[in-house]
Amino acid sequence: MKKINSLKIPIYRDAGFYLENADKTSKAFNEETLHSREPETYIYSRYRNPTVVAVEKQIMELEESGWALLCESGMAAIDIALSVFQKGKDTGNWLFFSEIYGGTNSFIDQVLIKGRGLNIHRYYAENGSYDLNRLEKVLIEIKPELLYFEVISNPMLMVSDVKSILSLAKNTDCKVIIDNTFATPYLLNPLNMGADLVIHSATKYLSGHGNVTAGVVCGNDVALMQNAIEYRKLVGHMLSPDDAYRLGTQMKTFRLRFKQQCRNAGMLAELLEKHPAVETVLYPGLLSLPSHIIARNLFEKDAYGAMLTFDLAGINDADKKKKRDTFIGLISDQIHLIPSLGDTETILLPVEPVWGEKYPLPGMIRLSAGVEEPEELLQLIIGALDKLVE
């Protein structure tokens, strides 16, 4: 076949790959039992696909990992990462931080506890941060085999002291999974600090355009990779080659996008904190956030992420709810209410309708900063807030 002079990754839509003869078939299936990251001979796209593998290499470079495995959603990545540590009835205690994505908490309750009968413990934050002295005591007391947390929590944007937590976990021989979706590889590479696995909802910042649903698990340990490859194959958690191709093209602008998004979020957070229509602003770059010092010492660049959460001022909950709905209505033509984040366009999500009892705060809004011109974004949002206090 003639070689095509294109620099683009080909899209291999093959369900099954041509194996030519019985000897090559036997060799390919025998090699498949080794669960190599990149097979010498492809067999079936549920096992591995060359387009998907090529994009996984891009993520390896971003996350500075020895391997990366793409799957069809962030929740699929969570399932893969957690499942490779399960040992049936011999699975020991697992510990999860309380401030994590709602879908992860639902997975814990419905799948890990109710469906699989695992021994799950939760470690709760106090006053916007985790007490590491108390965490050390809990780790010694319950001796968890696995610890799971987020670098920046959703939606309260609490920053975890990753270095200290990893040190405590390793002292008790505890494996660690870190969700790096909000911080992204732009701010932090947790595998370099000793994390065992790092996951992303690649739907968010790695894609960044709101039109691809994907997840990824990253690591360095070969045995974990082999277990993850096998699990992904058996349950069918494989990303399609078309989605992988689009994700690969979008990741080429990841650093540019995220840098601008961080800049917009930081500028907006500073202005919101001074506005009379706003009671509280949660953003890691603000001195007022309890975990700001942790963020300042942790992140590798002068940036603090592209998410911010703010609570509108009001005389009571009903007043706050009314102002929230008015504010959303005033900007809805330009800033849309979408249950996602990380897009190139700024989007928002009211907290109480989504998180309910956990965060019964009717005036609170989570905002995902886009890449718009800062002046235009600030003028739109501040203009809407001004109308709330007229």
Image: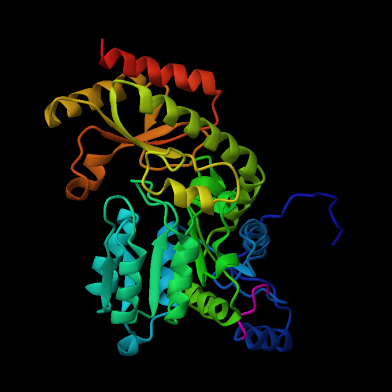
Residue 47 in which image quadrant: bottom right
Residue at left offset 19%, top offset 46% = 356
Q: Determine whether 297 is above or below 176 in the image.
A: above
Above-or-below relation of 162 to 84:
above
Does residue 156 appear anywhere in the picture? yes
**Residue at horizontal 56%, vertical 23%?**
373
Q: Is residue 22 left or right of residue 382?
A: right
Q: Nearer the viewer, residue 111 or 174?
A: 174
Magenta stretch: includes residue 279: no
Residue range (magenta): 34-38
Residue 373 located left or right of residue 336 = right
> Which one is nearer the viewer's eye here, 58 or 295?
295
Figure quadrant of the C terminus: top left
Which quadrant would residue 328 be assigned to in this image? top left
Q: Is residue 263 above or below residue 24?
A: above
Residue 332, given in percent of the width and then of the height, sits at: 35, 23
For residue 107, which quarter of the picture? Answer: bottom left
Query: Residue 63 at x, y = what percent?
Result: 61, 59
State which quarter of the image contains the N terminus: bottom right
Q: Residue furthest top?
A: 390
Residue at left offset 37%, top offset 50%: 158
Secondary structure predominantly adopted by residues drawn in magenta: loop
Image coordinates for residue 161, horizontal then vertical, percent: 44, 59
Residue 318 placement, left or right of 354: left
Residue positioned 40% across, 21% down in the render: 381
Of residues 227 and 361, the one nearer the viewer is 361
Residue 236: in sight, yes or no? no
Colouring: rainbow
Total marks shown come to: 0
- Image vertical order of residue 330 relative to residue 135, above or below: above
Q: Position of residue 62 (x, y in %)?
A: 64, 56
